[in-house]
Image (tube, rainbow, N blue to C red):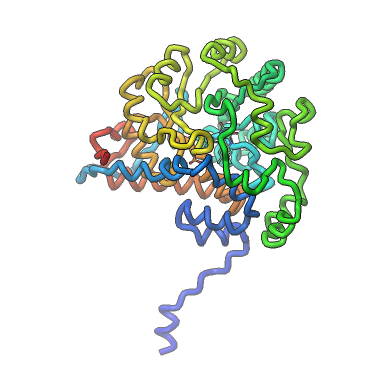
Amino acid sequence: MLRSLKDVLRFKRFEKNPAQRRLNKAANIADLRTIAQRRLPGGVFDYIDGAAEDERTLRDNVSAFSNYKFKPRVLRDVSNIDSSAKILGTATPLPLICAPTGFTRIAHSDGELAVSRSAAKAEIPFSLSTMATRSIEEIHQTTKQLEEAQNLSPRNWFQVYVWKDRGLLRDLLDRANEADFEAIVITVDTAVLGRRERDVRRGFTLPPQLGIATIIDGVRNPGWTWNFVANEPIRFANVVGKSTDDGSTAVSLADHVNAQFDQSLSWDDIEWFKQHWGRKIVLKGIQTIEDAKLSVQHGVDAIALSNHGGRQLDDAPNPIDLVQPVFNAVGGQVEIFCDGGIRRGSDIVKAIALGADACMIGRPFLYGLGAAGEKGVDWVLNFLKEGMHQTMALLGAKHLTDLHPDLIETRY
Ligand SMILES: Cc1cc2nc3c(=O)[nH]c(=O)nc-3n(C[C@H](O)[C@H](O)[C@H](O)COP(=O)(O)O)c2cc1C
């Protein structure tokens, strides 16, 4: 009796690392989101998770993927699935890019350093936001260390918001060039900041002000609070001392953006960038076929079909719905990235089958970071890769070149 009980009873070894313990309980990105929500103060979680106005675009970015069903082919050799691709002409094992996110250290003090390291380990590009909380030089240094220690080739991109102060912008481009950044990503959907009503309601500022509500929240979230106060203050690391708005005093994001960004930016300015940046250029925030065609005319290397994760214009088109029409219009002339709503490897497979060259993610790695720091970001990138491989195997596609629109049925 005791013997047979012993046969069926199996106690898992106790996991000593608390971040790993949390990750062991997660099965998907939604679980990580729940863990992050439990750990982060409400205002911080809402800054990451929230979007503009009624948040319809945020929801639809995700749910739009369910309008694309698979038509799996069977009895095809799917041993050794290969998800390798090219992004900006360079080989990568996974058609995925970490999108730029501002104020990343708010989720965890390792912030952009953790995300850039995870991306380098997964051999995919990492984009550093203009509003980042680690500088261009810090990213260069941390990924260079990985390069030397692990023989990796980190790919760092710099995301540009176009400041009114062109001198400051030129300085940022020079620094990115000096630090071997491969590309710039010009975000073109943020003439003014979208109305993010969760932040409005909470009076959220960057950095967060330690008011009474934050203190109460802090007591409820001791892990985050300790991490926040025990580390150096969070700043807009790329413009420290160079702008009156460098994050050393609390500002609302809307005030910051509306004061600093150039609202007169137009297609003619792309030429200015070409003069001052000799490497690859990505336009992020393209939302129509017409603007995709204009991007080709202006000679950029890639476009990111993106509505900023629903954080700007509510009721904007969902990126996955743009992929096929944009591919039909400009495919082969410019690389196409699908940015927004990716929560599973199968979503990436759908986007590639419809014509995208790669996908970008924002919130998924922020949930990972909030839940478990760098380990959490590693977990997300691995989860998406495994999900892609599994989907390709079940779909009868061994390589990305086997992914075609005829494997997808569109239900609209
Ligand atoms: C907290 C947060 C901050 C962001 N900051 C920036 C930014 O500084 N620059 C930018 O171009 N996009 C920014 N984005 C948008 C992302 O780059 C990306 O377009 C979006 O997150 C994709 O949608 P997803 O979150 O569903 O993956 C941000 C998104 C989030 C969630």
Tell me residue 127's x, y (percent).
57, 32
The residue at the point 46 percent across, 28 percent down is 304
- The residue at the far left in this view is 75
The residue at the point 38 percent across, 35 percent down is 320
Please identify the quarter of the rendering in which residue 272 is found. top right
Position of 203 relative to 127 (above/below): below
Position of 315 relative to 272 (above/below): below
Q: Is residue 141 visible?
A: no
Tell me residue 46's x, y (percent).
59, 48
Between 14 and 346, the residue placed more toward the observer is 346
Quadrant occupied by the N terminus:
bottom left
The residue at the point 62 percent across, 44 percent down is 200
- The residue at the far bottom in this view is 1
Tell me residue 208's x, y (percent).
71, 46
Left or right of 250, for residue 348: left
Left or right of 118, for residue 251: right
Left or right of 163, for residue 398: left
Please identify the quarter of the rendering in which residue 137 is found. top right
The residue at the point 67 percent across, 45 percent down is 204
